[in-house]
Every structure is written in C-alpha cells, then in structure tokens.
Image: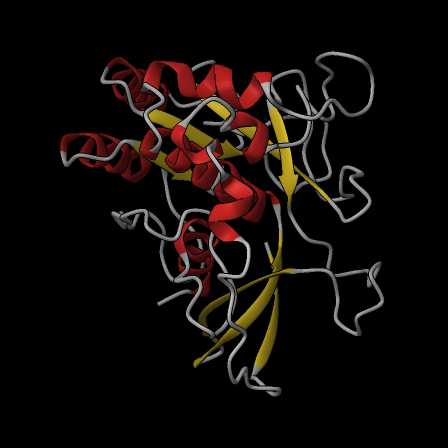
Amino acid sequence: DGWHGTHVAGVVAQATNNNEGVAGMAPRAAILPVKVLDARGGGNSLDLALGIRWAVDNGAQIINMSLGLDEPSAMVQEACQYAASKGVVLIAATGNDSAERVQYPAAYPSVIAVAAVDLNLEVTDYSNVGPEVDLVAPGGDLSQDQDGDGLVDGVMQAALFEGEWQYVLAEGTSIATPHVSGAAALLLANGVPPSQVRDRLLGSAEDLGAPGHDPYTGWGLLDPVKALEDTTASVNEEDRYSGSWDQGDVPTEQPMGCAER
C-alpha cells in the first residue's frame, strides 16, 4: 500500500536481463518482505523490533532497514544484537534530515550505516552524517540533472506510485541502503561467510573525502566489484558477461513518477 518498500526491494533484486525496465543489484536474491511501516511510512520502535526478530527467526540472512528513529530504542538495539548474534547482516539508512546525526538503528555498532551520494560522488544535501557512517552509496538527487539526460537524478525502480504501477525516480538514504544490501547478498551468494561481509564491504570501499574513515563518507563509496574479488564472481567476468545483453524491443515511453525519500 506504499511505493517505498517496493522501490527499495527493486534496488536489491529487480528482475534483470529480461529486456524490460531496469536492473537490481542482486536479481536472484530472495526477498522476505516484513512490513513494519504503514502506508504513509509511519511506524514505531516496537513494530521494528518485532519485525527484526521475526525476520531472523524466519531465515533472513540480511536485513535492509531503509527507515530510521530519531531516538535510541532499547528494544530495537536488543533486536539488532539478537540478529547479529545469529550471523545476520544488518544494514540501515542514516536519515534524510540534512543533520550531523545518524538515526537509529543505523547508529548502532551492529548495523552498517549508509549515507547517500549524488552523481558527482558528493554527499547529498539531505543525507544525515556523523561518526557512525560506514559507507556511502547512490541515493539520487531530485533537485538536479547532472548527467543532462532530461530526467532528474533519482534512482529508478518499479513500484506502485499514486495508484499506478510505474517506474519511480526516488532519492534518499533509504535508496542508498539497498545498494549495500544487494552487494552483501552477492557476497553471501559467492561464498563469503556472513562474519566477513561487513569487513569486505568496508575494506573494499573507494575512499572519498578525508583519508581513511570520516563522518561524512565513512570508509568510502560502495564498490561491489572490488568486494567480490577472489570469489567465484570474479572469475572470467569479462568473458562471462560480454555480449550477453540483448536490448530487444525496449519501450520508448513509460509512465514515470518522482518521489522523495
């Protein structure tokens, strides 16, 4: 009943290489949808904590949390610790308040905190930052058209928006977060143990801003290709994919929507 969660799921696992629409980061990943927000995106810490525990108990290996609380919650922190103790990778958005304050649960040590950058790899005006930031990833910027393609620079995925199933251009740290979750799924799928996923993602990031970790870009820009080095995904990659993309009859006109966060 809301576009946001579907858009986020699409960034992770939108159907790919099918001559239609756009692509997901890890198109063969299985999605376990756990609804903790209402149609307007509102929710509470109890529902979030219960949702985290339910996901863990029902086989989730990665939990993407494109949401945030302004204040810490003991229930949510305990749920995150429970998930981490079971080997589940937790990834969350830093928030969209243009503040030097990372929201929860992203601020907890057990969670990978993701801020957003634009096409120029600059931290977006809306992105929350702070010492807890771990990574940055593409979050879109609906105020600009930096590539001059005639569209604002949102991240495009399919979702039900304003009552119509369409391709939606969106922005937000919510949109940056599933890029990291998709990369984490690729690591797990290629044999990286859950205990090593965080270090792989942070250690392979492209350093931006001040050398090393900084409160604006964390350890740097998500780099899935580098993270996948020395796994089965990195073997003969060029030969494996060259020539495999058939454009086919791609529609030239599609419904389009724009949405913030």
Image spot of residue 2 (x, y percent): 41, 65
- Is there any visible trace of residue 240 in the rendered image? yes
Q: Quadrant of residue 213?
A: top right
Residue 188, position in %: x, y? Answer: 34, 29
Residue at the image point whose x is 27% and y is 18% from the top: 87
User: Residue 69, can we see it?
Assistant: no
- Residue 242 location (% of width, % of height): 55, 54
Q: Residue at x 29, y 49 (%)?
A: 31
Which quadrant holds the N terminus?
bottom left
Image position of 131 with respect to 40: above or below: above
Q: As rendered, which of 231 and 182 lies closer to the eye?
A: 231
Q: Looking at this rendering, what residue extends furthest in the left direction?
A: 58
Q: Quadrant of residue 110?
A: top left
Q: What's the colour scheme?
A: secondary structure
Residue sitting nearer the eye, 164 or 62: 62
- Give left or right: position of 122 versus 187: right
Q: Is residue 102 left or right of residue 10?
A: right
Depth check, front residue: 213 or 19:
19
Residue under the image location 70 percent in, 26 percent down: 206
Query: Residue sitting at 63 percent across and 24 percent down?
Result: 205
Estimate the x, y position of residue 34 in percent, counting from the top left. Answer: 27, 47
Vertical placement of 89 versus 121: above or below? above
Count how many numbered circles sit on residues in the image. 0
- Quarter residue 150 falls in: bottom right
